[in-house]
Structures are given as C-alpha cells and as structure tokens.
C-alpha cells in the first residue's frame, strides 16, 4: 500500500495523519481540504476565540515542524465531488483525479440553516470554521443587540460569549426546552436559569420564525408567540448537517451518517470514515465531539494499516458557559434511566447522575467537577453498581469508589 487519500482536514483528519506516520506508514498521504486552514480544533471557536481569550493559532493540533514531518500532499482549497469505488479514485472540483489504496472520509458536518433564504441575509451568521468565527468577531465590535437561533450547545456558548461582552442577547429555541436532544429536563432547567440569571432572554417553542433585513442592515426576527424584534445580527446555531453526500453518491451504506464497523470501515473494505460524518459503531448514530473525532480517527488509521483497533469509546464532550465548565459523559437515555441523582456541592458545582435499574451509571452531567468525570469514566467502563445515597451524600468521598 503506497497511497492513502483523506477527504477533510479537521480534527479527525489531523489525528489520522498523525497516527499513520507514527505507526510507520511511509507512503503518500493526500489530504483534500475546502479550507486553507487545516488540522485545527473547532470547539474553542464559539468560546475562547470568539471572546478573544485565545488566538486562532492556538487551535492548531500540530506545530509547523510536525506538519512538515508528516509530508502531506495538500489539495486546498478544493472539494472532493465524487468517489469511484470500483476504479478507487476521488474526483476533485479542480479537475484533479486522485487514486487511492485506502480512503478516509472525514468530511465532518456543516451548520444547519432551517430556512435557506436566511443565508442570503447580510448580518446572519453561523459558526463552524475559522472564517465564520472571524466574521462574527468583527460584527461583535459594533453589534449590541444579538439574536441566537437555537438553544443547543453552540447557540448557548455563543450567547454566553456575547453576554460576557455586554451584548443584549435573546435566544430563540424551537423546542420546549434547551438542549433537549442531549440532556434531561432538569439539566435544561439548570441551563435556562444559568442564562437568564446572566440577563439573556429566552424564547422557547419558537416554532415559527421569519427573518427579514430592515433599515441599516439590521435583522427583523418575527416570532409568532412574542412578536417582532430588531437585532444588529443573528447567529444561527440550529444544529448540524452531516456531510455524507460523497458516501451517498458512492452507494456506501449510509443512514444519518456513514455506517462503519468498530474499525471505522465502511461497506466498502477500502473506504473508512471517522468523526462527525461516521456513525458511532455501538451507539448507532453520529457523535459530534472532538474526542470522538480524534479517537475514532486513530482507530481507523491503525486499522487501515492492518492493526485492527476497535473503537468503542464512551461519548464525552464539554461546554464552557459563563463560570461553568459543563462536561457530558455517556448519552441521554430516558428509556434506560430508572433513577436520577443530583449532587449539589455548592452554587457553582453540581452533578447529575443517571442510573439504570441495576444502579449502573449510563449518563452524567458535571458542572465544574472535572475530577469526578475522570472517576465516572471508570464506573461506566466497568459497569460498576453504585449506591444512590452515597452519590448524593456530600459527606461521602466519592473518590473512595475507584
């Protein structure tokens, strides 16, 4: 094997390249990127970078020296437009055709815009890449009144960042509660209180929104339930659209994302996928987190080289909002949850534990409790049976439960 092609240049692609080289692969690695910027972290964009607490350069996964050592053959900015799995080639928008021995699809996801016409309005933004972040940061220099459409993690992070800069912020959420797909009602209440206490106005059940450009390029947001509102800009954080088109056109097995086995292998034995675009092999749906992108890519890269490495990681992601570092371990499974235990250490530290009928942990939301998350990963991995009373008892040292 002397040629590997990777489509995408985000977290998954970067760690795949790193793994291939550290595992001793010395053949050609071609990377197709639709951006000039490559191999960088995206989570800090809506938080530290937008708030100017971190620089764009700090997002880089690797140093310039490491990139040189990887000896990547770049195709950027360019787009892969077609895969011929029989000829084992990838066609690029530029007209180039790349042959491959193994192919990794790491195309990730893009911002979902509920109404296509919204993207044509001048002061309507999304947040998925460095350019998006820079555009919004420039707008924040003068904008004072900001609307965020979407009460998921991206929307809440942007709202918190804007509010910390003294902006007037209003959130419009389609559903009846915040982050409803990923957390329980009690955590949604916690998040709502967190933002309202900071001065953000939240509109739930905003199922019918219209956006129009009015005078001075301001944006009018018409909400059926709460009337008309005028903003300097609108940020759409209404979820993600999985970039699975290449796989679909190539007739790979595709559902919400690309179906892969535990080694990252698709229905074609020479085509792999990792990151947002790939369905988690044991959960059955796509996981959008940097840890998933990194670790699934590492597993896939090793497996491409013949070192079959199963990927079965427990989902873990984090969010910074105001003074809170919020970590999510496992997945929200209301049908499997028999008991919820809330451990509130103080006003800024608390944990929500979700136990099944055997009192085994299946999901955890931790606020400013990073050490406890590390311990809980062991509980999840070992299917440890827990005592709900001990979890709730502040006088009991949970570190004894190793």
Image (cartoon, grey):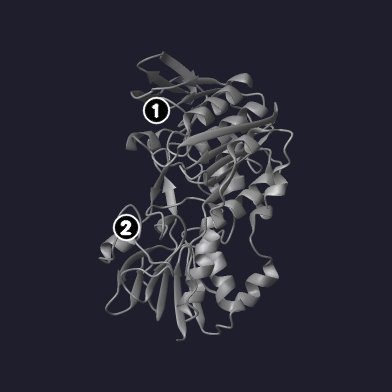
Q: Secondary structure at mark 1?
A: loop
Residue 106: x and y in percent read 45, 62
Q: Does label 2 or label 1 sit earlier along the sequence? A: 1
What residue is at 59 percent from the left and 83 percent from the top? 24
**Residue under pointer 2:** 245
Of tags 2 and 1, which is closer to the observer?
1
Specify the label residue 64 is tagged with.
none
Q: In the image, is 140 to the left or to the right of 94? A: right
Left or right position of 191 against 220: right
Judging depth in this view, the residue of 168 and 196 nearest the camera is 196
Instruction: Provide the residue designation for mark 1.
Output: 175
Above or below, comparing residue 264 to residue 366 in the picture: below
- Position of residue 10 measured from the top left corner of the image (x, y, whole percent): 52, 59
Q: Which residue is the extreme one toward the top?
A: 227
- Quarter of the figure with residue 348: top right
Residue 51 sits above or below residue 246 on the image:
above
Q: Is residue 164 left or right of residue 357?
A: right
Residue 168 visible somewhere in the drawing: no
Label 2 neighbourhood size at 10 Å, few (<14), some (14-19), many (20+)? some
Q: CA distance from mark 2 to mark 1?
A: 28 Å
Instruction: Please report the residue visible at 50 percent of the width from the left and 63 percent of the height from the top.
Output: 296
Residue 258 vertical placement versus 302 (above, below):
above
* Label 1 crowd bin: few (<14), some (14–19), many (20+), radius 10 Å: some
């Amino acid at each position: 094997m002397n040629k590997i092609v990777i489509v995408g240049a985000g977290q998954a692609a970067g760690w795949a390249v790193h793994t291939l080289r550290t595992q001793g692969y010395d053949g050609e690695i071609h990377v197709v990127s639709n951006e000039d910027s490559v191999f960088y972290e995206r989570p800090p964009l809506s938080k530290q970078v937008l708030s100017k607490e971190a620089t764009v350069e700090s997002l880089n996964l690797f140093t310039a020296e490491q990139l040189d050592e990887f000896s990547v053959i770049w195709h950027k900015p360019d787009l892969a437009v077609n895969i011929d799995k029989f000829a084992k080639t990838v066609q690029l928008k530029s007209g180039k055709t790349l042959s491959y021995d193994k192919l990794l699809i790491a195309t990730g996801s893009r911002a979902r815009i509920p109404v296509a016409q919204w993207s044509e309005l001048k002061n309507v933004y999304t947040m998925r890449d460095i350019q998006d972040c820079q555009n919004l940061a420039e707008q924040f220099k003068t904008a004072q009144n900001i609307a965020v459409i979407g009460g998921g993690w991206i929307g809440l992070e942007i709202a918190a960042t804007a509010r910390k800069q003294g902006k007037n912020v209003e959130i419009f959420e389609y559903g009846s509660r915040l982050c409803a797909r990923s957390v329980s009602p009690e955590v949604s209440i916690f998040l709502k209180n967190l933002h309202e206490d900071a001065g953000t106005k939240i509109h739930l059940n905003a199922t019918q929104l219209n956006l129009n450009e009015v005078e001075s390029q301001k944006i009018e947001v018409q909400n059926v339930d709460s009337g008309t509102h005028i903003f300097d800009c609108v940020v759409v954080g209404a979820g993600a659209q999985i970039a699975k088109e290449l796989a679909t056109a190539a007739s790979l097995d595709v559902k919400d994302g690309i179906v892969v086995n535990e080694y990252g292998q698709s229905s074609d034995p020479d085509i792999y996928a990792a990151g947002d675009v790939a369905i988690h092999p044991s959960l059955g749906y796509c996981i959008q987190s940097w840890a998933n992108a990194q670790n699934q890519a590492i597993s896939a890269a090793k497996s491409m080289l013949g070192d079959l490495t199963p990927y079965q990681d427990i989902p873990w992601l984090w969010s910074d909002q105001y003074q809170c570092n919020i970590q999510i371990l496992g997945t929200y499974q209301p049908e499997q949850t028999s008991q919820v235990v809330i451990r509130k250490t103080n006003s800024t530290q608390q944990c929500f534990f979700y136990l099944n009928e055997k009192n085994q942990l299946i999901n955890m939301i931790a606020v400013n409790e990073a050490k406890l998350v590390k311990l809980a990963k062991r509980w999840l991995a070992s299917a440890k049976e827990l005592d709900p009373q001990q979890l709730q008892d502040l006088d009991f040292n949970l570190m004894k439960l190793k």
